[in-house]
Image (spheres, grey):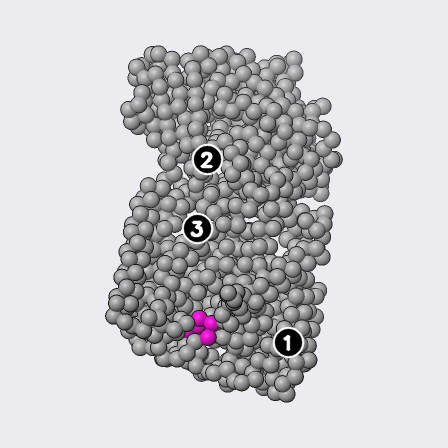
Amino acid sequence: MAPKTLPPGAAERLRAAVVAACVAALAFCVGDAIARQYPFGWRTRNVNDLGNQYVPYHVHLWDLLHGKADGGLLLNWQSGYGTSFLPDLGTYLTSPFALLVGVFPRDRIDLALYVITVLKTASAAAAMTCLLLALRPGRWWAAGLLGTSYALCGWTLMLASYNPMWLDGLIAFPLLCLVGEWARAGRRPIVSVLVVALCWTANFYSAYMATVGAGLVFIARLLTDTGSATRRKLSSAGRAAISLVLGIGLTAPLLLPIVEGAHLAYPLPVEEFEPTSWYDLLTRLLPGTYGFETPSTYIDTGALLLALVLPFHPAVPRRTRAVWTVLAVAVTGSLQWGPTHAFWHAFTSPNGSQYRQTFVLSGVLVIVAWLAVAHGLPGRRQVACGAGVMTALVGIGAIGAERGLAGVGAYPGAALGLVAVVGALLLLRRAERVRRTLPAAIGIGLLFTTQFAQSALSNAWTDGKREAAFDDYAVWGQRHQWQYETIAAADGWPAYRTEPGREQTVGNDPLVVGGQGAQYYSSHTPEVWTRTLTALGGGWTSRGRSLQNLDNPVTDVLFSVGARLHSPIDPHQRGAAPQTAPPTVTREQVPPLVTVHAPATAPYGRSPYRNQELLLGSRVYTTPGAFRLHDSQGRAVDSGPDGFRVTGSHGDWKSSMYKLEASCPAGDRIFLWSPNLMGNVHLTREQPVRFVGRAPSHRAPVQPLGTAPANGRFTAWVRVLEPGTLEADGIGCLDLRRLAAAERGLAAGAATRVDVTDDGISAQLPPGSRGFAVISTPSIKGWGCAADGASHRVESYLGLLSVPLDGRTTRVSCTFTPPGLRLGEAACGASLLGVAGLAAYEWWRRARRRSSGAGGTDDGGWNAGGSASGGSVSGGSVSGGSVSGAEDDATPRRAGALVEDRVV
């Protein structure tokens, strides 16, 4: 029996996709190697949110896969003292590629995430290559070349390489365009639904943008299809809409909790969109440019030149040239107009880069380039016109582009690339005319070499600029290992919490090194937790979305923190000396997670010391009132409505020093609350304490300065680094004996047993308990509680979860269900019924065709109304599964037009 072989069209697509994937992966890695970036050198990849969010969440996924996490898919007990996890899962971790972290060791998550990034980039190249060959048959090597151009576009190198979940959108765009092609042909209805569901599950945010882009491509395909009646076009649109609705509906159990989580998150300031200058936008078309506030429009010179050739290419039908040129210009313009900018971002204000949809523009330009080359190689006149337009665009951009946007190699690299691409196209044209393989081989080699060099060097340039522009964090090393091992040895969950400590390594330390902390950084950080922690003296960055740990004995009692890690300053973050010893652990006597409190007497006020006492139910602080402050000249500084105004700078330390004088009872712990201070504070003969307050993005927490001396009077020296304020009532004096007594009182009436599950908590209470059973976790939306088995209302006790007690209740239990999950499950169920109905209809239609003797040939159609041979639609023939009969597919391939095919 002869072995089965792939059909010619499928073999060609496979060959092109493999080449595109390999070239994209290799060029990406070579660029990182040139930049000496991990894993090829000493530079860390973990800049900005990659180190603070995405690596930590993938570590937590590793723990979940190996059964070592505190919590489950619905609830995360390790971050924010207990928070919803399903929205974070859907935002960061539901890509199929993410599961690969499970096969790597835990201390190699950085490597796992890099491998995932490379695989996603390669997959995007392969997916685009397959799309191009489905849109129109053509030279397989050209499709592979352009697929690589798409995968290594400026958006990938600039943004997505350190936001790996967005790369799923890069893959989704060509896949969703293929769904549109299947809808036009009336093929693969069930597969279409599943592809949509997969894309929206992998990353809904970038999939939304990809869906918008695929919709525009679908409209362009309908407009250029002159061989189909309006009714058939409307049927195609209906099939595409059904696939989209059913596919998104299947993701509803994940999508709706994400939407609810975003709605309940701490609100960010709304930023008005300000478009970048057109000069900057045009300059970003070049290789070797970098600008965080400008769109990354780069695609390699070969792809860009071919896209600019299309309007002048006589072999391409006039309507095709007009429609696709207008589409490319319209998508470019939509980047710059406020209403379309809002639409691209689902009417939300991006926190960071304002041009996250740019990959769709790159995809459209690549499709335009493919249509230019698939209809036949352009001649000298067309190449000259395209090169002239490209030169003009670059020249206009150079006139007014922002200084530093283009690297030293940007213009020379573009010029050399243009010369090489023009020469390659002319060589290929000559090879086609004389039917010689050597010129064709040289031309193809020139195109691939130009692309490879431009993209690899652009990636290397971007790596260096990005590291200089953002905060960066070390890959897993000795510090992480020591912290992880120390916390594991001290961990006593759920009897008490183990805090990873005030000196954080990343923004999500509990997920990386273990423990159960207040720290939490996410796009879904609950507003209730940010406001509660802020009222208690907590600090944050990222405008309230990145919460920091508190180092305070009172909050340790309130949140059952029985063990606390103490690490030196992270040497990677601040350039301190290398850490030479493991961190230490201090232990405190604390009550369990569930305590019984009397009704609160007042809401939170301004002072964190009074707010802590209000939640504790006991007075443990004394405040010295307004302290005395003197500037560097010894002059007294007067207090205003906002406290003491202080000024300073990093360079001028003499005029930036202030002297603070106050008093506390002897032996009390001295705390300073100054949320808007950027500087260092230290008592005489004590180590300085860093305060990082810069409204509205940073807020400094309450921090301990030391212990009051025997006479109670102390002096603190304040080194101001930026203008800010010192709170006039910012000194708090903590009596540790009173706190110990308050802790014993809480413990005496607390739960006698506490059980924690992956999605809830239950507690056994002493008989006669009255007031409120307060659970030391934020009262986020989604909790449902029961008292002695009977459903009971959930109340917020000063921001914490609580259940009212009537004196007879002996057991309370609470279960967490992420908001939106129940409605999402209902929507998913309805979509499943729709998919089942669609499958039944398809089965019935096929059975009917067989029984009516329709020739015995079945294309798996979906009410297409056309012939069923190899995916064709009536009106023309098809090669490789593409739809014919359209004007842009009507030009036949000339005999001998693909001389270059014999080269490889």
Q: Which mark is residue 201?
A: 3
Q: Residue at x 45, y 15 (%)?
A: 746
Cα separation, mark 3 vs mark 1, equals 41 Å
Looking at the picture, how far across and down is residue 896, in whole percent? 57, 84
Foreground pick, 861 / 380: 861
Secondary structure under tag 3 reads: helix
Q: Quadrant of the C terminus?
A: bottom right
| In the image, residue 423 above or below residue 207 | below
Among numbered discs 2 and 3, the one appearing first in the sequence: 2
Among numbered discs 3 and 1, the one appearing first in the sequence: 3
Among numbered discs 1 and 2, the one appearing first in the sequence: 2
| In the image, residue 79 above or below residue 737 | below
Question: What residue is shown with label 1?
Answer: 903
- Residue 677 can be seen, yes or no: no
| In the image, residue 29 above or below residue 502 | below
Q: Residue at x 30, y 17 (%)?
A: 806
Secondary structure under tag 2 reads: loop
Left or right: where does residue 337 sit relative to residue 577?
Answer: left
Report if residue 806 lies within the magenta region.
Answer: no
Looking at the picture, how far across and down is residue 596, in whole percent? 40, 18
The kind of residue on which mark 2 rests is: Gly
Around disc 3, counting alpha carbons within 10 Å, would you say few (fewer than 14), some (14 to 19), or many (20 or more)? many
The span shown in magenta is 879-883
Q: Quadrant of residue 459?
A: bottom right
Question: What residue is shown with label 2?
Answer: 72
Foreground pick, 665 / 658: 665
Q: Residue at x 30, y 23 (%)?
A: 789
